[in-house]
Each structure stands twice: as C-alpha cells, then as structure tokens.
Image: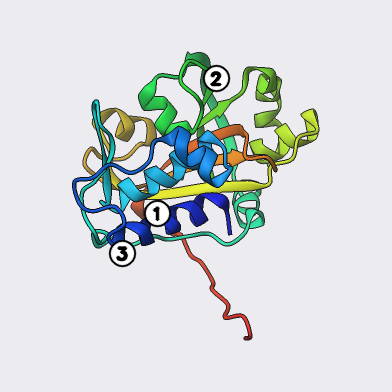
Amino acid sequence: MTKVVNLARHLRQQIEQGRYPVGSAIPTEAELQRRFDVSRHTVREALRDLKTQGLVSARAGVGTVVRAQAPAASFVHGMGTLEEIIQFGEATRMKILGHESVEVDEALAGETGARTGQELVLVSLLRFRPKERLPVGHLKVYLRPEHAEVIGEIEKGHIPVLRLVERRYAVGIKEVVQRINAVSLTRAQAATLSGKAGQPALKVTRHYLDGQGRHLMATVGLYPGERLSHNTRLRIQPA
C-alpha cells in the first residue's frame, strides 16, 4: 500500500473521529511532511484524495479546511498492477500530433503532480487499436526535458512511453497513481477524436513515480465511452 494511501487513510480517520472538526484546519503540508516523514508530493496527493472525497477544501489564508466528516458518495475504481497498464500500451499504436515545452502552473501541477515552475515537454498523441482508423483515445504525455529524446521512438513500435523512458535513461518506474473521471467531450476534443461534443468519455490521469516517490512523467488520456471499457479482476487473498 502506497504512502499516499496510508496518509490519506490516516487523515480521513482523524476527520471521521472528530480529531479535526468540520470548519477546522488540518496541519500544513510542511507539518505533515515532517510528522509522517514523506515527500511533498505524497502530502499533496493525499490531500487531493481527501478533496475528491469531499472531506476537505483549500481556503485562501487559512489552508486546508475540513468541510465534511464523512466522504461524499463516489465510486473509486483501481487497477491492480503496472503490467496491466503496459499491456494496454503494447496493444495500441501511437500517432504524434505535436509536442511543445510547457511551464507548470498551479492547475498543471494538480494535473501532472509536477512542481509549480517546473518545465515539462508535452506530447500530444492519438492512440489506435491495430488496423483501426478511428482513434480509441487522445493522450497527453508530460515528460521531463531530459527524457524528451524518446519522442522520436514513440511511433516506431508498440512500446509504451514509460518503457521507452526506463530503457533509454536507466530509471525505474515503481508506482503509478491513477485517477479515472467521467467527463463530456468539448467541441475541440470531439473534433480531435472524431466524436461528438457532449459525448461521455473517461479521463484517465496517471502520475509515474520512481522508488523514492519522485515524479518521472505523467499522462492524461481521454477516451470516448463506447471505445474503452476499464475492467479489473479482484482476487481474494487467503487469510
């Protein structure tokens, strides 16, 4: 179980037990880092999880404030292993639409898990199943600048970008934090995907971390509902 999950669970229990009442502020990010000996990224991901559950919200000049003692009703869908993500990547081909350097602002920091002010290389891709002309989805890949040379290899084979980064730069991706949201396609997104504006879609956001919890890359995928289903098999472990 990841440090993010452990921290989010601990804070949630503290809120549910009344340690942090509704309307009160929980400890600052810096204090949580020191208290639990975790990275700033871990703290922010844990707080983002609590925000998604509707338990806390950010308030200017105050910090992170408790807004509810119990989470709002929601459905969280997880994927078991990194290999399942890799297999999906190997089963599709990529077409590059373009790439550019971007500076991470506050909104992009929340999307990618990178720090504000950091420079990243954004690669825009269409993802296709073999022998199909209609894209299954649109993928934005956020790379560290020192890893940008893999862009030239993306269209050469069915090798996921994360594997290209690992092999070329001898880094190890040990953890993937995944978030799946239901969205509707905007007019521009529909045009890119040959779909219809307002069409239901899945937005799949992934942050790729090394063994020390450091950010290596991020992806944001957009998949029209009828083109992708997300299936998970859960196995009960013996006591």
Q: In this view, does 31 lie to the left or right of 94?
A: left
Residue at 65%, 50% (x, y): give it.
86
Q: Earlier in the sequence, mark 1 or mark 3?
A: 1
Residue 189 higher or lower than 55, as above or below: above
Q: Earlier in the sequence, mark 1 or mark 2?
A: 1
State the residue lying farthest toward the bottom.
Answer: 239
CA distance for labels 2 and 3: 41 Å
Q: Which amino acid does label 3 sit on?
A: Gln
Q: Can residue 85 be seen in this view?
A: yes
Tell me whether circle 1 and circle 2 mark residues in contact (CB < 8 Å).
no
Quarter of the figure with residue 109:
top left
* Quarter that holds the N terminus: bottom right
Mark 1 element type: helix
Q: In this view, does 81 lie to the left or right of 134?
A: right
Q: Which amino acid does label 2 sit on?
A: Leu
Q: Which amino acid does label 1 sit on?
A: Leu
Label 3, on which residue? 17
The disc at residue 11 is 1
Which tag is nearer the camera, tag 1 or tag 3? 3
Label 2, on which residue? 120
Which tag is nearer the camera, tag 1 or tag 2? 1
Q: Residues within 10 Å of mark 1 (few under 14, many from 20)?
A: some
Mark 2 element type: strand
Residue at 39%, 44% (x, y): give it.
47
The disc at residue 140 is none
User: In the image, residue 36 lies at what x, y percent?
Assistant: 54, 46
Tell me whether circle 1 and circle 3 mark residues in contact (CB < 8 Å).
no
Residue at 29%, 27% (x, y): give it.
188
